[in-house]
Image (cartoon, rainbow, N blue to C red):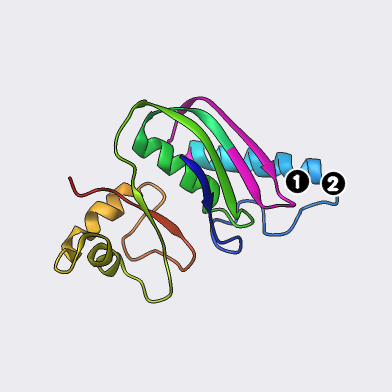
């Protein structure tokens, strides 16, 4: 997939936005552990899943083999939609290849309906549920999105 940019100040507050200690290695370990726990909590799995973090740069590298493209993308989103992370380097592979999703960074005033109309075309707002389902379990409710959050926008067909 490559390198993905995220908004460093947005996302799940798994370990805070500032280093927990003055020890960069300890902060990186805390970030890796916290993100891996979050991925596990979201019931996402990949063979050989491995993370590296450089929190002084706000970077996370993820590797492993996911069963499918959707799982791969959700793992990348779990890494990137974390407060303190601004870049995810995706070195993952998939067992079952499929078309990649588009990505959308939520801005103030966005709704899933409006995002669906922008991504799929005017009159396609009712496809918002496709976007909601594509981002579960990270999204618990279609109205609970926030500025700076990055969402998967799956292809229509």
Residue behind mark 1: 27
The quadrant of the image that shows the C terminus is top left
Residue furthest bottom as drawn: 109
| Secondary structure at numbered mark 1 | helix
Marks 1,2: beta carbons within 8 A: yes
Say whether residue 76 is left or right of residue 131. right
Up-down relation of residue 153 to residue 91 (above or below): below
Residue furthest right as drawn: 22
| Secondary structure at numbered mark 2 | loop
Residue depicted at 32% across the width and 69% down the height: 111
Residue depicted at 38% across the width and 76% down the height: 109
Viewer-proximal residue among 135 and 1: 1
Q: Please state the horizontal and vertical placement of residue 20, each as a whole percent of the image.
A: 77, 53
Residue depicted at 80% across the width and 46% down the height: 24
Q: Which mark is residue 41?
A: none
Task: Count neighbours of disc 2 (C-alpha within 10 A) and say few if under 14, some if 14 to 19, many if 20 or more.
Answer: few
Say whether residue 103 is left or right of residue 31. left
Q: Please state the horizontal and vertical placement of residue 39, each as a whole percent of the image.
A: 50, 39
Up-down relation of residue 36 to residue 146 (above or below): above
Q: Please state the horizontal and vertical placement of residue 144, each as a whole percent of the image.
A: 38, 64
The quadrant of the image that shows the N terminus is top left
Residue stretch in magenta: 41-61
Residue depicted at 42% across the width and 66% down the height: 106
Q: Please state the horizontal and vertical placement of residue 28, each as a whole percent of the image.
A: 72, 43
Residue furthest front as drawn: 2
Label 1, label 2: how many angstroms apart (C-alpha)?
6 Å
Residue behind mark 2: 23
Viewer-proximal residue among 77 and 100: 100
Asked whether residue 58 is drawn in magenta, I would say yes
């Amino acid at each position: 997939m490559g390198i993905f940019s995220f908004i460093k100040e947005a996302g799940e507050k798994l370990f805070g936005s500032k280093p927990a200690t003055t020890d960069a290695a300890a902060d990186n370990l805390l970030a890796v552990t916290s993100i891996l726990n979050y991925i596990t909590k979201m019931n996402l799995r990949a063979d050989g899943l491995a993370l590296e973090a450089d929190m002084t740069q706000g970077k996370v590298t993820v590797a492993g083999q996911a069963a499918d493209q959707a799982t791969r993308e959700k793992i990348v989103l779990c890494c990137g939609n974390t407060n303190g992370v601004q870049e995810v380097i995706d070195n993952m592979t998939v067992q079952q290849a499929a078309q990649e999703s588009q990505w959308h960074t939520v801005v103030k005033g966005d709704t899933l309906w409006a995002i669906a109309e922008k991504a799929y075309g005017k009159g396609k707002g009712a496809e918002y549920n496709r976007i909601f389902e594509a981002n579960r379990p990270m999204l618990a409710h279609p109205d609970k999105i926030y500025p700076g959050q990055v969402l998967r926008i799956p292809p229509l067909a």
